[in-house]
Amino acid sequence: MIEIDLEKRLGDFQLAARFSAEGNGILALFGRSGSGKTSLVNALAGLIRPDRGRIAIDGEVLFSSAERIDRPPERRRLGYVFQEGRLFPHYSVRGNLVYGRPRSRAHDATLDFDAVVELLRLAPLLDRRPHHLSGGEKQRVAIGRALLADPRLLLMDEPLASLDFAHRAEILPFIEELRERLRIPIVYVSHAMEEIVRLADTLVLMSEGRIAAVGSVEDLTSRLDLRPLTGRFDAGAVIRATVAGADLTFGLSELSFPGGRLRVPHLGLALGTPVRVRIRARDVALALAPPAGLSILNVFAGRVLEVAEDRGTMVDVRLDVGRPDRPVMLWARVTRRSTHDLGLAPGKPIYALVKSVALDRMSFSPYSRVGEADGL
Amino acid sequence: MLLTPFEITALVLSIQVSVVAVVASLVPGIAVAWLLARCRFPGKALVDGFIHLPLVLPPVVVGYTLLVLLGRRGVLGAWLYGVFGITFAFNWKGAALASAVVSFPLLVRAIRLSLEAVDRRLEAAARTLGAGRPRVFLTVTLPLTAPGLLTGTILAFARSLGEFGATITFVSNIPGETQTLPLALYSLVQQPSGDAAAGRLVVISIVLSLAALVASELVARRVRRQIGSAA
């Protein structure tokens, strides 16, 4: 359980954040640059001191202006992976990794050095110096270093922001593995929606130093009022599904969700694996009747919930393509002309067409948290 | 070139005085540099100015001030002698003190510049890894200050080797006690027949300085490799 209630003035910027969230899995802080995400994480880590407020993790108070508690960063047991790595240039990779190892016998580290080295594939790097590492390697070492300090919670401040696309794709699976294998709670700061979709269990939306909303990724991305924060061009919905079959002849995977079966490029995941899929609004087309003679594989029957009034040529339409007991929200982006021609209005039965090839590798994340993904 | 006992005495004394002066200045030098680089306190500009005084004052003024303060009958000197039995008057310790005082600003300046260049974000990272302030200082700040420590040490050592005015004013020119290379050279130049001997001392001084420079360059390379960056 993470409880935060703090105020901090930083020049012209006022941070006033207040929320509490279950402290397991990955909690993502999402917002534009300058929305206060990093300041919030720094306050959590004890690197900046709030003017007022209270910070507690699992009931343990780390900061409280009322009780005059301010634990120094070294006694908060929070691992911190910084955007720029911040490896010590005068130590080897091995020296960096062991820097934070708990040194008292009484406190036995839960993570084994070799296990972390293996998990992050650091063995070939151990004797190198940080300036001989690539950006992706640096971040892997930084993650390992934070983990080996045996933190109760891992803070990651845009750990992928300084990397190019290829290196980002290299690091993401490691972070997913941390969640699956180590079960260490993570607070993950990002302004990239595709990272959030792949990683986040809980989403905290920040805007101008304040918390705009807290909830699941699926709920928050389907809310129209949060659209200015969750992104417009890249707007989309997130659905949960399970791997239900594979069509090896054509290299496709079939995902089952309450709205039917979604065929996507082959994922290489075992049957029954829960996955989360992000379907962007611009990859969904609408039809009044089930179409024939079409290359699109995924057709879902549903009805229109809402037509977002907009001044431009584009209109976002919110649909429900699930069953009455298990609604599944999708967004479709169509022209205003089509809205008019098809007579789209709330309640109208509709067919949603999703192009399989539009769902790239970044759209999926295996999702195996017990109890949350069952019953689909 | 075999050295005469006179030359050996002056050479050994010079090295002894300079090494002691620099080694004894290191810890206070780091402390003062840290204070000036990292802390804000009233009168900071005054402290900064005071530390730098020996750099701009004529060395004779520094030597005379030391004599007045720390001579056997000086304000501090009498007390030190009475309570601890320590005196700096007319012995090699006084020569080392004079060297330390005049070279101190050079040491502090170099360390301070280096301290200001240390990436404080690395210190913050170390603290999130469980290191308290003392450990952060010893394992992150100080190692990253190494280039400045090295430069400061070399400058201070060089300044000490060449120290003349403050030393001769404070502790006089006593062979075997306070007569370092420059003072010995000065004595020889005063004698009508001292030219040849003076020439030999000049050569010794040049060799000693060159050796110090080469040694420092070797250490500097090592430090650069250790810290690793392109700096």
Image (cartoon, grey):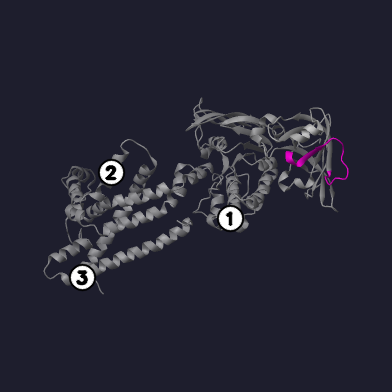
* Residue at the outermost top position: A66
| Left or right side of B59 for A244 | right
Question: Residue A161: image x %, image y %?
Answer: 59, 46
Determine whether the residue tagged by mark 1 lies in a helix, strand or loop: loop
Q: Which residues are magenta?
A: A281-297
Q: What's the residue at 54%, 51% (across, down)?
A: A96
From this viewpoint, which residue is outermost toward the bottom? B1
- Residue shown at 49% from the left, 46% from the top: B122
Q: Helix or strand or loop: what does disc 2 sit on? A: helix
Residue type at numbered disc 1: Ser
- Of residue B70 and residue A195, the one placed in the foreground of this image is A195
Q: Are marks 1 and 3 on the same chain?
A: no
Residue B40 screen position, x and y as percent: 37, 38
Report the residue marked by disc 1.
Answer: A134
Looking at the rendered image, the quarter that the N terminus of chain A falls into is top right
Q: Which residue was labeled with disc 2?
A: B49
